Image: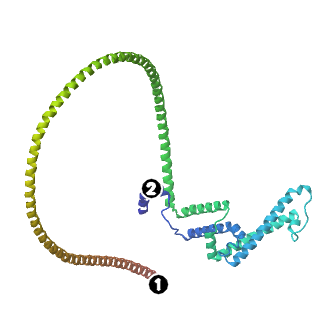
Amino acid sequence: KQWYQRRVRAKREDPLKILDPSSKKLVTVESQRIMAVLDDTICKIRLITLLPELTQNTDKYAGLISADITAMLKEHYKLELLFSKVFMLQEEEETVAHTGSAKKGGIDGDVEQMSYDSLCTYRSQLQQQIRHSTRSIVRLFTRNHSSLEAVLKKVSERPSAATSLISTSNNLRSIIMEKLLTTREEEEERSRYIQQIIQREAKASVEVKRLEGLLQEASEEREADLNKRNVEIKKLKSDLAQLQKSSNETNKRIKSDSMKQELTDTKTSDGKCERLNQSIAQLRTQLAQAVAEHRQSEQILRSRKIKTESALETWIAKYDTDMGERQDEYEQIEAVYKVEKQQLEDLEERFAVLEEEYNRIIEERRINAELKAEEERRLRLLTKAAVVIQAHWRSYSTRKKLKQKKKGKKGKKGKRK
């Protein structure tokens, strides 16, 4: 039940998470052996695909591998070269086979002097030797783990087909790992979940078809509406052309009327300018009279200003006297303030010492409380563990006594017989 609740919770969090196995580790010995064999195979594939690079550059990678492996790689390289040479000669022999001039020779002679059948036989022998050499190299690397790890870590040049094979092998390992981690219940649940998804997909496809039909109907209605509006637009364009034509005629008529009105306004403005010039002359005369009157009032205001300045000087002298007295009083208050400030600083220093002692005491109490709580928690854990151990021991003792009683009853029955 708990397992099912966990799967339901995982499904709510992530719908695709239900497809993943709940277990992350292999439990059975058989599955562990399968994965160990598969990992070993992938490791050998990675090593074998690096052999062309290692055999062609043995001096370059001499620091990574041991001397015996280097010697085996050189021998393997010689076999590969000889195999390539035999393969090329065999192709040449196939091209000229129809001429009847095939070479004669045996396996023990020079390769170039061998016949086609001898080359085929020799090629098969070389294939067997290359297989044997490859197996020997893999065995040596398997025994020397440091060289194997160094080569797999630092050598990465391999053909694209080999890279694809390794990627496919890793994908196969992931699939097998997932299959081994998946239990029967998870497999059944996964199939049910996939069946539900298929049913939902079928319902969704039906809904999509229905919506597509509605969309088609809406598109047809929209097309009809667009056609109707296009007709209206054409009609409005024709009306607009007629309005533009009539507006042009109206503009011409308004321009002619405005020119006539402009001539009339020009004549009227000339008469207004003459009248304004006359009013300007009158206003200048009035300005001269006002300036004379303002000069008299200015003299009166100047006399008032002199009187005001004398009164202001009297008030300033009085202000200076009052401020001198206030300054003396301020100095006396400032001296008293400094004394009280010094007393306040002394009290603050004493308070800081007391506050530090208070904080230290509070911290010690907090630490003691935490230690006490931790001790109580440990005591509860030990008590719970002792209770569990006692319960297991009592159950074990009871089962043992029951087994002994059963054995005793069987022995008594046998004696009675």
The spot of residue 35 in percent (x, y) is 58, 68
Q: Nearer the viewer, residue 359 or 241?
A: 241
Residue at 83% across / 59% down in the picture?
91
What residue does disc 1 label? 415
Question: Residue 369 bears which disc, if any?
Answer: none
Left of 303 or right of it: where is 214? Answer: right
Q: In the rendered view of the protein, which quadrant contains the N terminus? A: bottom left
- Furthest-bottom residue in this view: 415
Report crowding for label 2: few under 14, some 14 to 19, many 20 or more residues within 10 A (C-alpha): few
Asked if residue 44 can be seen in this view, the reply is yes
**Residue pointed to by mark 2:** 14
Q: Residue sitting at 13 percent across and 72 percent down?
A: 340
Left or right of 409 in this view: 91: right
Q: Nearer the viewer, mark 2 or mark 1?
A: 2
Q: Is residue 175 left or right of residue 56?
A: left
Other-residue count near label 1 (Cα within 10 Å), few / some / many at <14 / 14–19 / ≥20: few
| Type of amino acid under label 2 | Asp
Element on which disc 2 rests: loop
260 over 394 or under it: above or below: above
Q: Quadrant of residue 142?
A: bottom right
**Residue 128 in sight from this viewpoint:** no
Q: Position of residue 158 (x, y in %)?
A: 67, 64
Q: Element type at marker 1?
A: helix
